[in-house]
Amino acid sequence: MSIIAIRILSAAAFVILAPLVGGLLDGVDRKITARMQGRVGPPILQPFYDVIKLMNKQLLDVERMQGLIILSFLFFMIFTGALFFAGVDMLLCMFALSTAEMFLILAATITHSPYSYIGSQRELMQMFCYEPMILLVPIGFYLATGSFKAIGTIMSATSPIIYTPGFFIAFIVVLTIKFRKSPFDFSTSHHAHQEVIKGITTEMVGIRYAFMTIAEWYETVFLLAIVGLYFVNQNWWSYLIGLAVILAVYFFEILIDNTSARVKWGTMLRISWASTLIFCGINLLILDVMR
Amino acid sequence: MSNIAKSPWLIHYDGSSCNGCDIEVLACLTPVYDVERLGIINTGNPMHSDIFLITGGINSQNVDVVKQIYDQIPKPKVVVAVGACACTGGIFKDCYNIKGGVDTVIPVDIYVPGCAARPEAIIDGVVKAVGLFQQRYEEFEKKKREDKQNG
């Protein structure tokens, strides 16, 4: 099979399978969270039941334009992941991710609801905290493998984690913000369902909220794929290590979510930027000296 | 036709009451009763919810609030009145500012008695509401299809 066919197939596999994997991960998350709190918890397929229910609800139209914007958010999120799995330049993926995020903020502000307005302001604050690190991720891969493409990592003899452990640690920190986990769940929380009446999603009704949820599943799978990429090299067994690390990181995020209280935005900014500067910065300096 | 009864999200509003039923509703979310195992989420946002759970009676100040929350819940929706005050006005019935039970303002589907209503009774009421929710949804879909046929 030619390399082009493999790239197209892997992108297509992402488009089809990511919502299933993302939804399952969400269900596992809710189950583990419940068990950590001493509860039984909902069935693992619960997120799918929720999305099906939302799709069948009446659409209360707050703002007609919102529907198009949320579809754009979903589209750009799928586009981001498809680019990544097709082995296109990772810098482009990160720019597409930021574009998707802007559509989400637009979808919230367009309704003029005070709650979603607060949510979108907080979402902007979150972007401010994680965006430097997200943009540094492809640079880390470039320094480790000499290529901005995921395919460069797959072909290399050693895993990028050997050269970029600092990048990895700082990425895990901002992943907490991206997954909307406590202590960094400002704009809308993943579990509590009451955070400023659900923040950025306040005015998203029925099928629109379902689309937003599905887009977040795509995002989760895309971000976890980057986590796995740190451990992948040309050997087949490295993929197993990557998968194990993905599951471990996901469990770690759930643990952090359940053991920490929400902080103020200033603390989030300090923690995320400090970890980016310290772990990423030192790693970058060492790599630069080594070259 | 989908099975939507597996995902009933509820919004809880406490009207004019002693807060006893309010606390019992929140007790349903604790590890002992854990209503989330039935897929129930206490949303706080009417636009995301399916079941409107009200404790406490209606007074002249909260009548508009209750109406507005009810209107903001997308169809299909079910209303559950929890406790004596929400059902009839209860001990506050003769107060000068009390209008009575929730059914004086919006249509109530399920009445859960008790002062305060026990968590078991509340869960029982919600489970009944879930059945009605699925039934409402089927009626809602049927009406949508009929409207489409009639143009």
Image (tube, coloured by chain):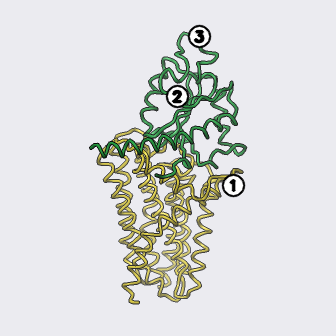
Q: Are marks 1 and 3 in contact (CB under 8 Å)?
A: no
- Both on one chain, marks 1 and 3? no
Examine the rendered structure and indicate whether residue B4 appears above or below residue B116: below
Between marks 2 and 1 in the image, the one whose residue lies nearer the viewer: 2
In what element is the residue under mark 3?
loop
Q: Which chain carries label 2?
A: B
User: Residue at position x 70%, y 32% from top?
Assistant: B118
User: Residue at position x 56%, y 74% from top?
Assistant: A165
Which x, y percent locates residue B59?
52, 18
Q: The green chain is which one?
A: B
The span from disc 1 to disc 3 (Cα, nearest Å) is: 47 Å
Q: Which mark is residue B94?
A: 3
Residue type indicated by callout 1: Met
Between marks 3 and 2 in the image, the one whose residue lies nearer the viewer: 2
The span from disc 2 to disc 1 (Cα, nearest Å) is: 37 Å
Query: Image quadrant of residue B74?
Result: top left
Residue type indicated by callout 3: Asp
User: Residue at position x 35%, y 50% from top?
Assistant: A107
- Both on one chain, marks 3 and 2? yes
Q: How many labels does the image show?
A: 3
Which x, y percent locates residue A191?
56, 50
Which x, y percent locates residue A215?
43, 59
Instruction: Check the rendered structure and report the hue given to chain A.
Output: yellow
Q: Mark 3 lies on which chain?
A: B
Crowd around label 1: few <14 · some 14–19 · many ≥20 (10 Å): some
Residue that numbered label 1 is attached to: A36
User: Residue at position x 36%, y 44% from top?
Assistant: B144
